[in-house]
Image (cartoon, rainbow, N blue to C red):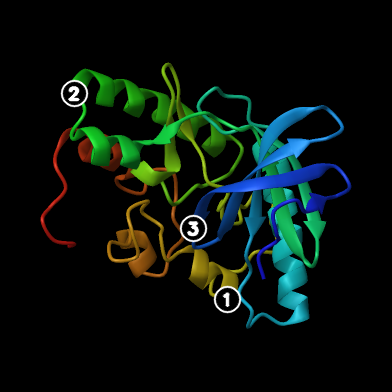
Amino acid sequence: MRAPSGYLLAARYRLMEPVGRGGMGTVWRAHDELLDRDVAVKEVRLPTVLDEELRAELCARTEREGRATAMVAHPSVITVFDVVTEDDRPWIVMELLRAKSLEQLIQEHGPLHPRRAAEIGRQILGALRAVHAKGILHRDVKPSNVLVTEDRAVLTDSDWPPSKATSPSHRRGSSWDRRVTSHPSGFSARRPAPRAICGRSARPSTPPSRAGVCTAAVRPPPPWPR
């Protein structure tokens, strides 16, 4: 069940209004009443079919991934301020950007100028290098997960899957592994990475999420889904 507007999370973050929804939850504009600043709060939605043990494991993994992501200092990686477990689910507190997603820009204005698309790709490449250095794979790099301001392109979305650096107990073939690898290439579940099809884990060189973001930015979408 989604939290209502006005909900006070961790006796600190007041949820104001939803600013985005996805398969993994709802992103809220919220107010940090301790530091008197606006933040983004992601309310992570866990599958209802999970038993208590797996739910607790996923909450713990989300907390570890949140801490790992918070250690990444890069202007093109969304800044994580806090991770909270409340009401038996994790919540992730991040910087609030006044921006549109790359997907929205393409829908509203059509293909971008190649020079601008290349600059966005350069910044996202830097973001991926920074998170890979921490042992984290995003696995869902796509235009809707790239926020664009006047001078920044920021890789967002908190659906970071378990990484070797923060989840040593992670086992290939677990329920969580099967779920998160449904988007290993950064495009969609319809276009999985070849390594994932063969049952192997994704890696930073898995093709071709970075190129895919740039390609989507400079050419019109196909008239039908592939």
- Give the crowd class for mark 3: few <14, some 14-19, many >=20 residues within 10 Å: few
Crowding around mark 1 (Cα neighbors within 10 Å: few <14, some 14 to 19, many 20+) is few
Residue position for label 1: 175
Q: Earlier in the sequence, mark 3 or mark 1?
A: 3
- Name the spot of residue 25 as percent of width and height, x first: 58, 59
The kind of secondary structure element at disc 3 is strand
Q: Quadrant of the C terminus?
A: bottom left
Q: Find the distance from the CA under tag 3 to the CA under tag 1.
A: 20 Å
Which residue is under mark 2? 114
Q: Is residue 174 visible?
A: no
Q: In percent of the image, x 12 and y 52: which residue is there?
A: 222
Q: Amino acid at mark 3?
A: Gly
Q: CA distance from mark 3 to mark 2?
A: 29 Å
Between disc 3 and disc 2, whose residue precedes?
3
Q: How many marks?
A: 3
Please name the amino acid that badge 1 sits on: Ser
Q: In front: mark 3 or mark 2?
A: 3
Distance from label 1 to label 2 (Cα)?
A: 41 Å
Residue beneath disc 3: 22
- Taking the spot 50% from the left edge, 27% from the top edge, the residue there is 76
Q: Quick check: marks 3 and 1 in contact, CB under 8 Å?
A: no
Determine whether, in the image, residue 65 is placed left or right of residue 214. Answer: right
Answer with the quarter of the image where residue 88 lies. bottom right
Q: Residues within 10 Å of mark 2 (few under 14, many from 20)?
A: some
Position in image of residue 159 (x %, y %)? 55, 53
> Outermost residue, left direction?
223
Question: Nearest the camera: 200 or 207?
Answer: 207
Q: Please say if 207 is above or below 225.
A: above
Circles 1 and 2: CB atoms closer than 8 Å: no
Q: Which mark is residue 165?
A: none
Mark 3 vs mark 1: in front: 3
Q: Quadrant of residue 55?
A: bottom right
